[in-house]
Image: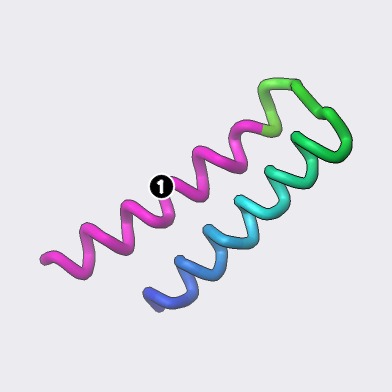
Amino acid sequence: MGNLLYLIAVILVIIWAVSFFAYHVSGGLIHILLVIAIIAILLRVIRSAA
């Protein structure tokens, strides 16, 4: 399951980067993808430390 969280985080960061830089989407909703990706990475780090 941990690898799945990293995979989801990477996919979300890629979607965010493409949307933000290629299509110049600057709305607040696109940044939610980045926040979700960071949360997924933090969950993986916290669960592996425990």
Residue type at mark 1 is Ile
Q: Residue at x 64, y 61 (%)?
A: 11
**Which is nearer the eye, 2 or 24?**
24
Q: Residue furthest right?
A: 23
SS of the residue at dot 1? Answer: helix
What secondary structure characterizes most of the magenta part? helix
Q: Which residues are magenta?
A: 31-50
Q: Residue at x 85, y 40 (%)?
A: 22
Q: Is residue 12 above or below residue 4?
A: above
- What residue sits right under mark 1 in the picture? 39
Q: Is residue 47 above or below residue 32?
A: below
Classify residue 8 by image quadrant.
Answer: bottom right
The x, y position of residue 17, in whole percent, is 70, 44
Q: Is residue 38 left or right of residue 19?
A: left
The x, y position of residue 29, in whole percent, is 69, 28
Q: Residue furthest left?
A: 50
Classify residue 28 by image quadrant.
Answer: top right
Q: Is residue 10 left or right of residue 44?
A: right
Q: Residue at x 88, y 35 (%)?
A: 23
